[in-house]
Amino acid sequence: MFGSDVIEVGIGVSLLFLFVSLICTAIRELVEGWTKTRAMDVERGLREILDDKSGTELVKSFFSHPQIFALFAGAYDPAKLVDRNGRSQTKMPFSGRHNLPSYIPASNFAIALIDIVAHGAVSPEASVYPPPTGGLSVQQVRAGVNTLGSSKVQRAVRTALDWSGGDIENAKTHLEEWFNSSMDRVSGWYKRRTQIILFLLGLAAACTFNIDAVHVTKRLILDKSLRAAVIAQAEKIGATSHDDVAKKDLSMLRSQFDAIGFPVGWPAPQGVHSAEARTSLVFVTLPHGCSLLKPGDQLGLGASTSMFLGWIITALAVTLGAPFWFDVLSKFMTIRSSLKPAASRTENKPKADGRVNDGAGVALANAPTLAPAAGEGYVARAWNYGDPQEGAI
């Protein structure tokens, strides 16, 4: 069934991109664990939210508050901020951010800010904090708003208090929403940087392991056994959740990738003998040991261009992320499961012209069904990239 074959090719391509994306994402997380760029973005975002670009006033007091100080080890040192290339946006270098938090809960932010407004700034050197007052009121917080150095932050806190209806919990909720909306922009910084890094990792992986999306797609179209291996692995993955798939380590991902038998790696499987390269699609089963694609001595200009294009496509696919390809794979599997009942009803039914549908393709009437005699080969109709022709294979 032609539609089923197309779906299986889509499953194979999606599975290829899923595995490469998972591997590159795992490498990206390893790099992030060392570079701590997410913590750098959070620190920079806090300086913008609290309108303290130098980090020496409200931001320093914020990081010294117990609600925030407990989230990381060490101390916040704004003296390490550097201005790179004269740009207005200063960034925290690795020496200053390696111990900073990569994530701050919105509730911790709101509680710390309300406490600073009501009880004053927190000094890192302070050994005694104001005693608890038995609960804060909106009036107490409003009375301390003017102690904030930034008029922008004052206005943000007053707005939360005005919309609280006199309930401190409502004011806290409004501050949490303000923080979350601001952190969405911070997440955008990280996502854009991650996409660039994933593209570079995907391109490096494609070049290193010769993961040519164009060639893999062609082989999936030609090779029924490869599609069968892909479907078997896709069914295993479909039985698990994305989180379980994402938790697999690099060695396990590599072993599953190798088990499928994708035509990747070196020597380049794209190189084929000129006599065999003419055929791009055959509708008969080839004798055992016969292969349409064999490594050649060298690649021509067209094959090299196609290979580079396949690498670029692989790298671009990686930037979409593993969750995207997991969803695409799941949708393809759902469509395939809906096509299988219809395909099973048409299997092994003779055609009016004598052809037989074997469920995978249509064998031509003049193609033999038995093994050829010695010295003979299968005769089949094969399609070149140009016009169709007949010949012995």
Image (cartoon, rainbow, N blue to C red):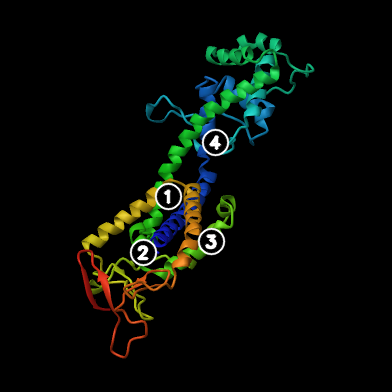
On the image, numbered disc 3 is attached to which residue?
235
On the image, numbered disc 4 is attached to which residue?
39
Neighbourhood count class around disc 1 (C-alpha, 10 Å): few under 14, some 14–19, many 20 upward:
many
Question: Which comes before the other along the chain, label 3 or label 2?
Answer: 2
Q: Is label 1 or label 2 in front?
A: 2
Kind of residue indicated by mark 2:
Ile
User: From the viewer's perspective, is 102 left or right of 301?
Assistant: right
Q: Is label 3 or label 1 in front?
A: 3
Which residue is farthest right?
A: 134
On the image, numbered disc 1 is attached to which residue?
318
Give me the C-alpha separation between circle 1 and circle 2: 22 Å
Question: Which comes before the other along the chain, label 1 or label 4?
Answer: 4
Residue at image x 52%, y 47%? 29
| Closer to the camera in the image, 231 or 58 | 231
Tag 1 secondary structure: helix
Quadrant showing the C terminus = bottom left
Could one spot residue 294 in this view of the protein? no
Question: Which comes before the other along the chain, label 4 or label 2?
Answer: 4
Kind of residue indicated by mark 3:
Glu
Question: Which comes before the other along the chain, label 3 or label 1?
Answer: 3
Residue at image x 35%, y 67%? 222
On the image, numbered disc 2 is attached to which residue?
221
User: From the viewer's perspective, is 72 left or right of 199?
Assistant: right
Kind of residue indicated by mark 1:
Val
Tag 4 secondary structure: helix
Question: Relative to 325, does residue 386 appear above or below in the rendering?
Answer: below
